[in-house]
Image: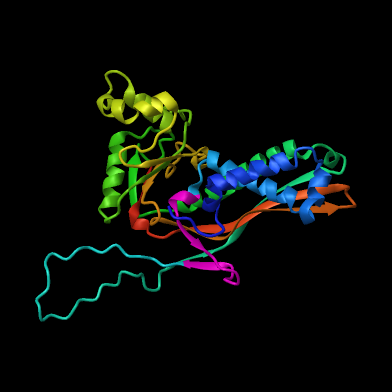
Amino acid sequence: MSSLPGTIFDKTTEAYVNSYYDNLNRYNNMSIEELISTDAGIAFPQTVAQRAAMQLLTLVDGRRMCRMEQVPERGGVAHVFQRIVSLVPSASGEADDADIAKDNIIGSGDNISVTLTMFRQRTPISDLTARQSGISLVESLGVAQGNGLNQQMNNDIYTVLKGNTTNKISLGAGADGKSYAYTYGNIFDAVGLVESSRGRADVLVTFPYGAKVSTGVDTGFFPFVRDNVGAGTAGSAVFVGALGDYLRTGQLGELFGLRLYRDNVYKSATLGADGTEYAHVLVSNQSMGWAQAWDIETEVEHRGYRKQYDVTSSCAGKSGRVLEAQICSIEHA
């Protein structure tokens, strides 16, 4: 995915990481109070923001599967994603002297409008704590606030993604109250539905593990792997090659051409309930959109009446389903 100025994807470069560790070395012997007053007060919040951004490198960042659009300054709080329509190819060509047929590939009157929202994390630090060494706190704050912002943004993306209605693979029966495990056959079917809309499916979103509900079975990606790589299973021959590296390292580049987004934030609290999603298949950079006003920023404010500093990290954006025909869910009937 190409980077946009001022987005998290610019903050994943070697130079950015080196800058963070240079700051750690430079301010290693300073207290938090000294860090806050260093370089016009920007050293501490800048380093926390750097660490928070780096933390997202270790997590599933749902924005990476979205079509990224930067909302410019003075762009307001609403953003419109241009909806692109998947055309059905014509059965034949046109005569030389025929008028060129009009194809409305850009959606008319039904573009996707979203309202930007802020994602925020605030941590109070007492004046007494501020007398201590700042570096360990920078690490802790950056990790914690990065984790929190990641959870909030991903939850926004998954909530919107789960609103799809066009393509669905149903498991089980309605109102049976049982959890189900999806199979590689279900994934193939979902890919087929996405590609029937001329999309090149390349993303699988799911969660790691869910304990069985009622008389159902364990569900999620780990049970999916377990049930399909064992000796004698129907899919074992397929998975021996496809998941060999995953079983050895815990990392998986692609599965059937799909990049894996395995995130517990995606997991529903109502496994076994009608309509609960177990996985989604979609097209990166097309199916979902992410409008971003600003990336992770950190500010520090002193509250004298509380004798504490407030360290606040925030970002702003909003997701939207841009091309629903190229999204398919695997869910409870």
Display coloring: rainbow
* Residue 197, quarter of picture: bottom left
x then y, percent, for residue 276: 44, 42
Left or right of 312 in this view: 93: left
Using the rendered image of the protein, determine whether residue 179 is visible from the camera's viewpoint. no
Using the rendered image of the protein, determine whether residue 226 is visible from the camera's viewpoint. yes
Any magenta on residue 64? Answer: yes
Of residues 84 and 275, the one nearer the viewer is 84
Q: How many marks?
A: 0
Left or right of 48 in this view: 264: left
Q: Residue furthest right?
A: 305
Q: Quadrant of the C terminus?
A: top left
With respect to residue 102, does 137 lie above or below? above
Of residues 47 and 316, the one nearer the viewer is 47
Residue at image position (29%, 62%) is 86
x then y, percent, for residue 103: 26, 72
Residue at image position (27%, 43%) is 189
Any magenta on residue 236? Answer: no
Residue at image position (69%, 47%) is 47
Of residues 173 and 282, the one nearer the viewer is 282
With respect to residue 181, does 331 lie above or below? below
x then y, percent, for residue 150: 57, 46
* Residue 190, quarter of picture: top left
* Residue 30, quarter of picture: top right
Left or right of 196 in this view: 151: right
Task: Report the span colored magenta.
Answer: 63-80
x then y, percent, for residue 268: 50, 40
